[in-house]
Amino acid sequence: MTVQNKTFYIKVNPDNPEDKIIQDAGRILREGGLVAFPTETVYGLGANALDPSAVGRIFAAKGRPSDNPLIVHISDNGQVYDVADDITAPAQRVMEIFWPGPLTVVLPKKAGVPGEVTAGLDTVAVRMPDHKVARKIIANAGVPIAAPSANTSGKPSPTTALHVLKDLEGKVNMIVDGGPCKVGLESTVLDLTCEPPVILRPGGITREQLEGVIGHVEIDPVLIDDNQNIIPRSPGMKYTHYSPEAEVIVITGRAEPVTSKIRELIAKHRSLGHRIGVLAPTENAGVYDGHEVYTLGSRSELESIARNLFYGLRFLDDKGVDIILAEGYPRKGMGVAIMNRLAKAAGNNIIVV
Ligand code: TXA
Ligand code: MG
């Protein structure tokens, strides 16, 4: 199937998806086309993982570098044996406990998985999403589905179907709109081919949750320490990511110095004639009155901050601001993933006060 410049956009009932929509999506995927669909983390851009030309279309549509491997999505636990080998007891335990859900496991790959999916690596990343629409589409397609986030490479991941439409209209065959994503940040990527296992990308499942099940898990110290503002060089982490058009600065530290620093930066940028956007928790939204403020949710509910983060970056971009000032969060629990995405959106421009 070729991807015509016409994209079929359709709304689906997320709790009880219409059969016709699932069948159309499944057929397009079987025929080698591209379908964007909702998952609980972010929207994915799917193609048949066993068809190298279909997988090639994903890279073309996103403008993604071909050396960044894709996650293979499955619709039930047993399907992991079709794509991965040497599945150890800890791997089995995390899949049993966290699937379906925002956890991707890296395992030795089966020979049948094309090198285009894994960027030539001998491992494969696998995930079973916790979203009815995603699982039904994958099951109907009857093949494992390679699916990166459905954004143009480098942009914030899409948490609504309209984000996908904005980035990929005319470049994909179908966009299935199942409403906003519940988690809002991508899955945690856990490498289980080494001992102890290593978190390659923090995400929807926290290190604490993983350690509760399989004991010690390694994480790059850079991800959990505010004072080591260096971008980690694990796979897929070396590219510019989550970057809105506006310049982003993250200000992190104790509450009072953070708000004072942001007010100081507001004054500086206003004097330069810049339009200013602020990403703030509910508690501090009022502090930045008079500017374009996007409220992410309460500081005491990091899940809500995570859910709204990419939405907020895209929202402020659409308002045409020149600079986005974002409050930071403690690098614990979900805060690790939030700060990782903020740091990358900011090109690591982080001020610790
Ligand atoms: O939540 C998610 O994971 C979303 C939804 C759509 O499922 N998908 C997603 O895919 O975020 P993507 O392509 O944007 O990110 C995949 C990440 C990249 O950092 C990539 O380098 C890493 O997974 N990855 C994929 N295969 C890998 C492998 N074999 N070894 C190490 N890292 C791998
Ligand atoms: Mg992505």
Image: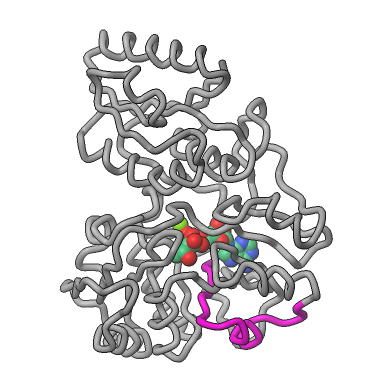
Image position of 254 (left or right of 268):
right
Residue 97 placement (x, y as % from top left): 66, 69
Which quadrant of the view contains residue 192?
bottom right
Residue 64, quarter of the rendered image: bottom left
Whether residue 84 is visible to the viewer of this picture, yes or no, is yes
Residue 41 is situated, as x and y percent measured from the top left of the image, at: 45, 59
In the rendered view of the protein, which quadrant contains the C terminus? top right
For ligand 1, give the image quadrant: bottom right
Q: Quadrant of residue 151?
A: bottom left
Magenta range: 70-87
Determine if the magenta segment contains residue 84. yes
**Is residue 71 found inside the magenta-colored segment of the image?**
yes
Answer whether residue 65 is visible to the viewer in this image: no
Q: Residue furthest left?
A: 6
Identify the residue at image location x=57%, y=49%.
Answer: 237
Residue 316 point in image, percent of width and height: 27, 36
- x 53%, y 24%: residue: 252
